């Protein structure tokens, strides 16, 4: 089925839902219908993008969408995804898949039984820097990987300057907020690069004066099944946006910085650092467009989902295990053992 002949239902008209709706239109979608519980957000997306909106979700299902994009707070992802799958509708679910393990297995079974396409929105897998790291590891340029460091931080009030951060889902535990779930991208692409995790330890807390009831900083230690040890730092606190990754192997080291267009690589055989150009012109929306292009090709049967609900569930399990490790002050094995 061609892109232009499909109907897409966008559920949730906040910043990410509006972005996806706009990108669908840019990619040539002829029919995009939007729903949000907030009339103000419905009116804003209708005014900005010219797409039809519905006042009730049932009317959205009544539009017979071929795919639903679920871009609501994390706590509502699972029931909306289950309802879409029950109706035989393919789903794009923004990260994280949920804020709880409850009901996840039922969604996986229902999705498999329905035979619909599923994708979880892990857009960092479409960043040229992360893709370059994946290719570097695929060529074994660094040899056996010994350790890794992943880091992201940004001051929460700067995330959405036009919105009071205190009302955002990020600030509210009951909506699935908190930096560990919010920054699940780092845990997801760490798994993509390094494989599955064996053990998890974590310190996480609310240490700042931000008016939130969620953790604003987390330091996570991971031991992968390969033996690689990684450190993951996540925070809502850094006043200057920072996102970096460092991989250390027996043959060399690679360093990536979101704010730079190069990947720095040190190979012991050369005895020197080199900078590999990632792009000349690039802007963040490109990875969201590439993510949607991938979803559309999956709908056409041309590609397999890079992060289906089963893969999204594994990253969610890792994030929730980190939260549990912090709460219980334990090292937790992904097979259930603790120490």
Image (spheres, rainbow, N blue to C red):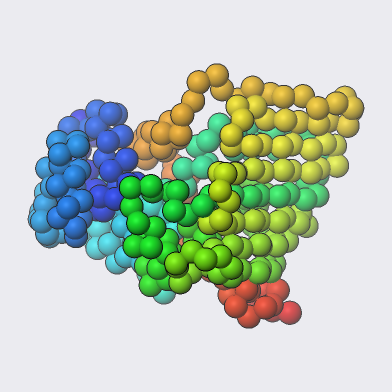
The quarter in which the N terminus is drawn is top left
Residue 185's spot in the image, x, y percent?
53, 51
Please name the residue shown 81% across and 31% down the image: 266
- Can residue 241 be seen? yes
The one of 103 and 34 positioned closer to us in this rendering: 34
Q: Where is residue 87 shown, x and y percent of the image?
A: 21, 58
Residue 324: image location, x then y, percent? 58, 75
Residue at horizontal 81 percent and vertical 27 percent from the top: 273
Locate the C terminus and report the quarter of the image it occupies.
bottom right
Residue at 72 percent of width and 55 percent of height: 230
**Residue most toward the top?**
280
Q: Residue at x 64, y 22 (%)?
A: 277
338 vs 91, left or right, is right
- Above or below residue 134? Residue 98 is below
- In-image side of 10 versus 203 (left or right): left
Counting labels gives 0
Does 207 appear above or below 230?
A: below
- Left or right placement of residue 37 versus residue 18 in this view: left
Above or below, comparing residue 242 to residue 234 in the picture:
above
Is residue 110 visible to the viewer in this orientation of the structure? no
On the image, which quarter does residue 22 sit in?
top left
Q: Position of residue 219 (x, y in %)?
A: 66, 62
Residue closer to the observer: 119 or 46: 46
């Amino acid at each position: 089925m061609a892109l232009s002949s499909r109907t897409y239902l966008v559920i949730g008209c906040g910043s990410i839902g509006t972005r996806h709706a706009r990108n669908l239109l840019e990619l040539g979608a002829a029919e995009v219908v939007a729903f949000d519980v907030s009339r103000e957000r419905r009116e804003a997306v209708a005014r900005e993008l010219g797409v039809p909106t519905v006042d009730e979700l049932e009317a959205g299902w009544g539009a017979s969408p071929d795919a639903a994009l679920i871009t609501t707070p994390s706590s509502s992802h699972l029931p909306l995804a289950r309802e879409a799958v029950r109706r035989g509708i393919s789903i794009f679910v923004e990260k994280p898949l949920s804020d709880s393990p409850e009901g996840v297995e039922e969604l996986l079974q229902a999705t498999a039984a329905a035979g619909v396409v599923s994708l979880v929105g892990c857009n960092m897998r479409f960043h040229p820097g992360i893709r370059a790291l994946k290719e570097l590891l695929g060529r074994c340029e660094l040899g056996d990987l010994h350790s890794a460091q992943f880091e992201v931080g940004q001051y929460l009030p700067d995330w959405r300057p036009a919105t009071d951060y205190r009302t955002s889902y990020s600030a509210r535990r009951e909506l699935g907020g908190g930096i560990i779930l919010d920054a699940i991208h780092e845990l997801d692409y760490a798994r993509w690069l390094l494989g599955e995790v064996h053990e998890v330890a974590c310190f996480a807390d609310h240490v700042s004066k931000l008016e939130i009831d969620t953790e604003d900083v987390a330091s996570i230690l991971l031991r992968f099944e390969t033996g690689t040890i990684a450190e993951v730092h996540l925070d809502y606190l850094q006043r200057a946006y920072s996102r970096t990754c460092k991989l250390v192997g027996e043959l060399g080291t690679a360093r990536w910085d979101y704010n730079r267009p190069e990947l720095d690589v040190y190979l012991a055989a050369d005895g020197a650092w080199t900078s590999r150009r990632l792009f000349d012109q690039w802007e963040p929306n490109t990875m969201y467009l590439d993510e949607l292009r991938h979803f559309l090709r999956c709908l056409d049967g041309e590609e397999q989902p890079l992060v289906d609900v089963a893969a999204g569930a594994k990253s969610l399990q890792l994030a929730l295990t980190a939260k549990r490790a912090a709460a219980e002050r334990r090292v937790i094995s992904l097979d259930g053992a603790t120490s």
